[in-house]
């Protein structure tokens, strides 16, 4: 098909040519019939001819057909694992001052882990993204003005499994950052807000099986947002 300038990757072209060879018994005869109904201006077979071939012929395999290898993949359920933990959270305001505090702690564990000294040619199974977290906030909320200064911390966790040809794990080291957000209700229908993410410009570090094998270091800087809210 490539010798006559026809797209051999087209299912329609492949089926039509195969059906013609099967019915006419020779490649030259099938090629002549194919070209007689091939529109070079659109680089496609005439649709009416395609419909005729699809209706009239069916291609079935026989013992003389060459073998063709297929690669088939499908998702499966992986190994099982148990995850357990607990979360503690609380919030308190000091009388009518508008000031308050809030905090939360999450503890998470699993019964499977990764072996950094395992055979590097073999995949391992473990739970990614599992870690302890802590956040604590100073809050003000009174008279239409609200603000929150928050410290967010996350412990070390497994970020990736079986990376590259050596099946390396990737860990994210403990990371904490301070965020701030505030808003003010100018009227019942109009408000303004501001937010700052990562005020202290912390860096996120990832490494392979041991700490000194740096994988990635991300410094995103401090991000600022401002907005106006309108209620109709």
Image: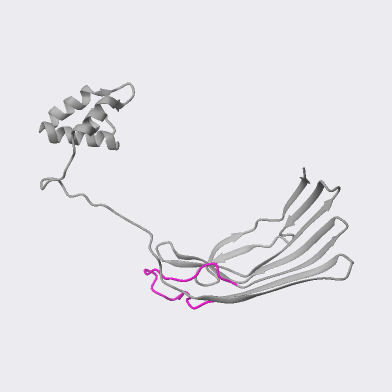
Magenta region, residue range: 109-131
Magenta stretch prevailing secondary structure = loop
In this rendering, position of residue 201 left or right of residue 70: right
Q: Quadrant of the C terminus?
A: top right
What's the residue at 17%, 25% (across, down)?
32
Q: Position of residue 184 (x, y in %)?
A: 83, 52
Image: 160 above or below 34? below
In this rendering, position of residue 114 left or right of residue 70: right
What's the residue at 62%, 63% (across, down)?
204
Please say whether residue 72 is visible from this viewpoint. yes
Q: Position of residue 19 (x, y in %)?
A: 18, 35
Image: 144 above or below 78? above
The quadrant where residue 212 appears: bottom right
What's the residue at 14%, 32% (across, down)?
27
Q: Position of residue 93 (x, y in %)?
A: 83, 69
Image: 141 above or below 91? above
Quick one: 136 or 89, which is closer to the camera? 89
Query: Is 115 colored magenta in this rendering?
Result: yes
């Amino acid at each position: 098909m490539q010798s006559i300038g026809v797209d051999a990757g087209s299912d329609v072209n492949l089926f039509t040519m195969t059906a013609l060879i099967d019915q006419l018994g020779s490649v030259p005869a099938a090629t002549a019939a194919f070209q007689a109904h091939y529109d070079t201006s659109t680089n496609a077979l005439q649709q009416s001819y395609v419909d005729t071939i699809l209706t009239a012929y069916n291609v079935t395999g026989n013992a003389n057909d060459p073998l063709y290898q297929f690669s088939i993949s499908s998702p499966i359920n992986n190994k099982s694992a148990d995850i357990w933990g607990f979360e503690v959270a609380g919030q308190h305001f000091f009388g009518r001052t508008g000031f308050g505090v809030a905090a939360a702690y999450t503890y998470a564990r699993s019964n499977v882990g990764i072996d950094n000294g395992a055979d590097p040619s073999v995949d391992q199974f473990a739970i990614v993204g599992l870690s302890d977290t802590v956040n604590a906030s100073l809050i003000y909320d009174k008279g239409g003005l609200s603000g929150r200064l928050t410290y967010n911390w996350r412990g070390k966790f497994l970020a990736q499994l079986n990376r590259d040809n050596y099946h390396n794990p990737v860990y994210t080291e403990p990371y904490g950052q301070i965020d701030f957000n505030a808003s003010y209700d100018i009227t019942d229908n109009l408000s303004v807000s501001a937010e700052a993410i990562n005020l202290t410009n912390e860096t996120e570090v990832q490494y392979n099986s041991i700490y000194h094998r740096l994988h990635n270091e991300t410094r995103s800087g401090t991000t600022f947002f401002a907005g106006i809210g309108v209620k109709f």
